[in-house]
Image (cartoon, grey):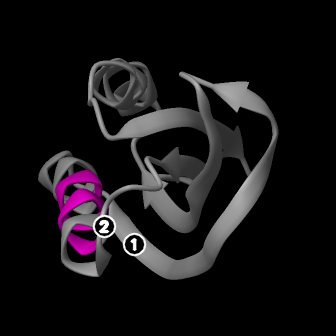
Amino acid sequence: MRAYELVFIVQPELDEAALQGVIEKVKGWITEAGGTINKIDLWGKRRLAYPIRKRHEGHYVLLEMQMPPTYSAELERNLRYFEPVMRFLIVNRA
């Protein structure tokens, strides 16, 4: 198991319940692969540095987690095709 940080930006139109649903879905992908979530930090709605899909704001979420290194490619694929997630970044905390 390796330690990772995942930061992702969710569409700003989503209400609090929908945002929690997106976070739960991402957490589910990680835990199904045998990973664990250490910390969830909601940064709130912030202005983007540049427009993404004609949006100027987004909900920022930080997850500190541990997961098998072989799962990072599949997690990236899942996030890339998950519509509410506008951008994401996975960083190895080694």
Residue 49 vs residue 86: left or right?
A: right
Residue at the spot 30% in from the left edge and 67% down from the top edge: 19
For the residue labelled by badge 1, is the local secondary structure a helix, a strand or a loop?
strand
Q: Is residue 70 magenta?
A: no
- The residue sitting at the right extreme is 49
Amino acid at pointer 2: Leu
Task: Magenta stretch: give its range.
Answer: 20-26
Expressed as whole percent of the image width and height from the top left, the position of residue 55 reads 59, 36
| 12 or 83: nearer the viewer | 12
Residue at the spot 31% in from the left edge and 58% down from the top edge: 35
Expressed as whole percent of the image width and height from the top left, the position of residue 49 reads 87, 39
Residue 24 vs residue 9: left or right?
A: left
Write down the residue under mark 2: 19
- Estimate how packed mark 2 is, as few (under 14), some (14 to 19) or many (20 or more) residues with alpha carbons within 10 Å: some
Write down the residue under mark 1: 37
Residue 6 vs residue 14: left or right?
A: right
Q: Is residue 25 magenta?
A: yes
| Closer to the eye: label 2 or 1 | 2
The answer to whether residue 4 is visible is no
Residue at the spot 58% in from the left edge and 25% down from the top edge: 54
Amino acid at pointer 1: Ile
Q: In the picture, residue 62 is in which quadrant?
A: bottom right
Q: Earlier in the sequence, mark 2 or mark 1?
A: 2
Magenta part, dominant SS: helix
Q: CA distance from mark 2 to mark 1?
A: 17 Å
Q: Is residue 1 above or below residue 69?
A: below
For the residue labelled by badge 2, is the local secondary structure a helix, a strand or a loop?
helix
Expressed as whole percent of the image width and height from the top left, the position of residue 37 reads 40, 72
The answer to whether residue 55 is visible is yes
